[in-house]
Image (cartoon, rainbow, N blue to C red):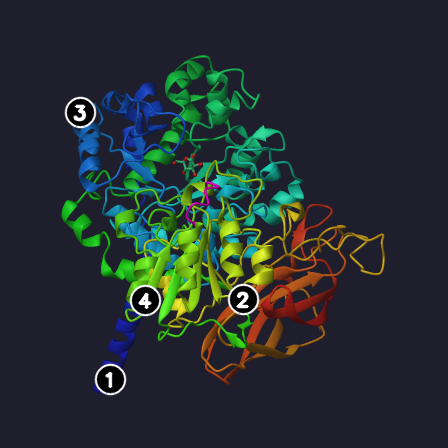
Amino acid sequence: MRPGKTIVTIMKNKLTLILLTIWVLPAFAQKDYTKEVEALLSKMTLEEKIGQMTLYTSGWDVTGPTLNENYKADIRAGRCGNIFNAHTAKYNRDLQRIAVEETRLKIPLLFGYDVIHGHKTIYPIPLAEACSWDLELIEKSARLSAREAAASGLHWTFNPMVDIARDPRWGRIAEGTGEDPFLGALMGAAKVRGYQGTDLSDPYTLMACVKHFAAYGAAQAGRDYHTVDMSERELRQTYLPPYKAAIDAGAASVMTSFNEYDGVPATGSKFLMDKVLRQEWGFDGIIVTDYGSVAEMIPHGFAVNGKHAGELAANATVDMDMQSGVFQNNLKQSVEEGKVSMKTIDDAVRRVLLKKFELGLFDDPYRYSNEEREKQEVFSDEMMQHARDAGRKSIVLLKNEPFNGQKLLPLAKTTRNIALIGPLTEAPEDILGSWHASGDASKAVTLLSALQQAVPGAKIFHAQGCSTESDDRSGFEAALNAARQADVVIMAVGENYRQNGEAASRSDIGLPGAQQALLEEIYKLGKPVVVVVMAGRPLTIGWMDENIPAIVNAWHLGTMAGPAITDVLFGDYNPSGKLVITFPRNVGQIPIFYSMKNTGRPFNANDKYTSKYLDVANTPLYPFGYGLSYTSFKYSDLKVSKPVIGFGEKLQVEVTVKNTGDRAGEEVVQLYTRDLVGSVTRPVKELKGFQKINLKPGESEKVTFTLTSDDLRFYTQAMEYKAEPGDFKVFVGGSSADVLEVGFELK
Ligand code: GLC
């Protein structure tokens, strides 16, 4: 064989080997621990098995209404095999030592925590980060969060929260990715990949936990923990896809939700936990309840007492009882009475032990508790830079109209006198957002300090003016004085971190406290005003939209919120965020979302008898997918590759996008479809694709999408998940409300 050929052959073989290593091996990285699990299970007493089905909060950080002060004694007695709300390498090492040195079988503890958008370094709240429409960015945030948390003694995060929410009165809308199932599914899967990587025993990864199963975000009237009642079709069509996508991405666990669905509390629902999760989706990971939700089946009126509640949960294939102690105190008797089978117990314990083996805890129980590594990872430069990058990409520019003939944004860095006014100008804990867990507010960079750094030559007149809660207006005068001395006023208003998140629903989602009054007083001075809104939900800011020329929606952006905001205000970053949640004009419009039905009497201004309100338009203040840039984009030449496609055939959709402004910018090109006629009525639009592109001034790009009949599937009247033939529309644009359209037929 010619030497050259030999070399080529060797090179080819090496390349094959490399590709195999890259592509094939990770799929088998997870070792099979069946033998080890069965060997351990066979030694366990019933009490020890139930201990592995028990999860208690440590006293370090309590995230719910109850605390078991005896959790250390329970660990020592083998009555508690899992702990949450405990972290730092040292604290967890000390707790782990009790389990692996003082118990009979030395089974390591599992440590869980709510690492929702960062651990010590805090990234934008999930609702904000979703507005980046940047899946790589979202996955990276999860990956970096896992690095920091896994260095601090943690194995398991109670995230991603993928609850679809269409009611901004619900405080936990802050924790999710908005109103759309297509987007929610992609983002939930990205977070699972980020947290878990390809090998749970990697000491830089965390087990993910998809929550809250299911449909927790559909609480009636946006009131937290309230009843959820919808058709099975709506559940499967709108609310389940993100959970399914996260589980298909390999999520190791699922958390049950507090709410009932169809009259049955999720924690005891055989339909949700066994039929859908286990049987239909083949999920064989851990199902853990939410905080005390087993016992809450009693006030739900679904269980007569704790023992009955425990039997309902265990028989629904729930594996672990978070915090209620019901499994710990009742399951033994239930098994002895035959109300819960030993097989049910063994199946649950197998799933818990398997994850502990896969995490590598039996090889090295202290693998995640390394104080040296903790020092290196926490607040690393990479994490702080990513926090800033994620922050600015989460910002949505809502308005930027001329003031005295000149657009206010981006502000000139030569601006001499700037007034910075409002309760969120210097609010280090509030900018971390509602679920910042172990986030360190002392590291948060506020808007005030970032402004001083961004324009060191400017004179900054700072006044809070009022708080986010009280009606006290005694600070107004100082704020007005600051504004009078300025060439431009920047106001930072919105919610503090306690005014959204869990158990923080609001019936009025306007600016809380005296902020609106302060804004109107400042406005009367006639100065150019830029408003930065910082909140964990859409706010009803209609007056602001009518009167203020420049509005930046900056959510709660985390540790680097300040620099992220000034990067946008002064044009160091051209805002690219697009809303993933509709902003209503008022609470009366709620629920309002882009993919609504057309009804039999769609609104017609010339016809009284059509679907509308007498006192407000049907349209939202700002629609799903909306967000401005400092440049502008023009869409043209939308076309489809053919007017008719068959089932399984591909339809190419093409549009030209041009940057018609004077600076480079990113644009999220969105593709929606509409099924004009179905065996059940279909929404007027459904998101089916998007691409984030970057264009220089004057640059054009042809953006193409591919659709097949699979993308057009829905739950038909017969509850079959399939596409139906007929006419469709395709819409493409930079917002759900600003699109080009073209038709095609599926035959
Ligand atoms: C809370 C939340 C849940 C969280 C859990 C543990 O009540 O509902 O999202 O993961 O308790 O803190």
The alpha-carbon separation of the residues under discs 2 and 1 comes to: 76 Å
Observer-side mark, 2 or 3, equals: 2
Residue at horizontal 61 percent and vertical 74 percent from the top: 652
Q: Which residue is mark 3?
A: 102
Question: Which corner quadrant holds the C terminus?
Answer: bottom right
Q: Position of residue 672 (x, y in %)?
A: 63, 64
The residue tagged 4 is 459
Sort mark 3 into few (<14), some (14-19) or many (20+) by Cα contacts within 10 Å. Answer: some
Report whether residue 423 is seen: yes
Which mark's residue is nearer the viewer, 4 or 1?
4
**Left or right for 145, reference 479:** left
Q: Please tell me in which quarter of the rendered image ligand 1 is found.
A: top left
Taking the spot 40% from the left edge, 22% from the top edge, the residue there is 327
Residue 491 higher or lower than 40, as above or below = below
Q: Tell me the amino acid under the disc marked 4.
A: Lys
Query: Is the stretch drawn in magenta largely helix, strand or loop?
Result: loop
Tell me which numbered mark, 4 or 1, is placed earlier along the sequence. 1
Mark toward the viewer: 3 or 1: 3
* First reached walking from the N terminus: tag 3 or tag 4: 3
Q: Secondary structure at mark 2?
A: loop
- Disc on the earlier residue, 2 or 3: 3
Magenta-colored span: 469-475
- Ligand 1 has an atom within 8 Å of the beta carbon of the residue at disc 3: no
Mark 2, residues whose alpha carbon is within 10 Å: few (<14), some, or many (≥20)?
many
Above or below 216: residue 702? below
Mark 2 lies on residue: 549
Q: Amino acid at mark 1?
A: Met
Q: Is residue 470 magenta?
A: yes
Tag of residue 697: none
Closer to us: mark 3 or mark 4? 4
Mark 2 or 4, closer to the camera: 4
